[in-house]
């Protein structure tokens, strides 16, 4: 049983599914377990545990009755996916190769935690991602 896993609610399911399929293949060597474009759903597992699930924002809005509200308002990010990686610089380079843009270059963050190195990226669908190693 998966206790906790991230589920990203995405505006552009096709773009997000392509990015995460390529990115997770490159970073972790895993393939999606399921991709159902008509339902706006995709998931990836590693060692029989959920790693990531994508769900179309429109589909969840219909499920919870908020489809009449704007899908996004101009604002600061409300959530961020954090990935611990062995090499922040390499992971950032790989994900930019799949279409992510770098917001903050790889850098040491001793003020956050001794030995911490991070980079911040935005996926093609707009998700904020922090890569970190320590």
Image (cartoon, rainbow, N blue to C red):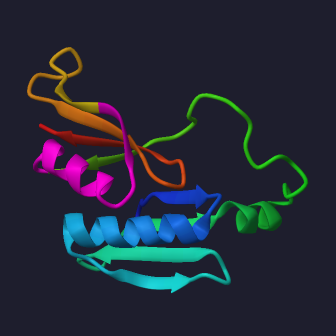
Is 67 placed left or right of 84 in the picture? Answer: right
At x 67%, y 84%, the residue is 38
Residue 87 is inside the magenta segment: yes
Quadrant of the image containing the C terminus: top left
At x 74%, y 63%, the residue is 58
Asked whether 8 or 24 is in front, the reply is: 24
At x 40%, y 84%, the residue is 33
Using the image, determine if residue 107 lies above or below residue 50: above
At x 56%, y 34%, the residue is 77
Residue 97 is inside the magenta segment: yes
Is 81 placed left or right of 29 in the picture? Answer: right
Single out the residue that lies furthest toward the right. 68
Single out the residue that lies furthest toward the top. 111
Is 18 placed left or right of 85 in the picture? Answer: right
Residue 55 lies, in percent from the top left, at 60, 67
Q: Is residue 2 visible?
A: no
Is 117 placed left or right of 4 in the picture? Answer: left
> Which residues are drawn in magenta?
86-104
Quadrant of the image containing the N terminus: bottom left
Using the image, determine if residue 52 lies above or below residue 90: below
Asked whether 65 or 23 is in front, the reply is: 23
Residue 52 lies, in percent from the top left, at 41, 65
Residue 100 lies, in percent from the top left, at 39, 51
Residue 60 lies, in percent from the top left, at 72, 64
């Amino acid at each position: 049983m998966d206790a906790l896993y991230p589920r990203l609610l995405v505006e552009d399911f096709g773009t997000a599914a392509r990015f995460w399929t390529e990115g997770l293949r490159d970073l972790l060597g895993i393939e999606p377990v399921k991709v159902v474009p008509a339902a706006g759903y995709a998931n990836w597992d590693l060692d029989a545990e959920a790693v990531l699930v994508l769900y179309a924002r429109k589909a969840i809005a219909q499920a919870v009755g908020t489809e009449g509200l704007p899908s996004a308002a101009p604002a600061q990010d409300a959530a961020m996916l954090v990935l611990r990686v062995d090499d922040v610089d390499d992971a950032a380079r790989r994900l930019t190769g799949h279409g992510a843009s770098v917001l903050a270059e790889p850098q040491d963050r001793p003020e956050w935690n001794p030995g911490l190195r991070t980079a911040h990226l935005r996926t093609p669908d707009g998700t904020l991602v922090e890569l970190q190693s320590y």
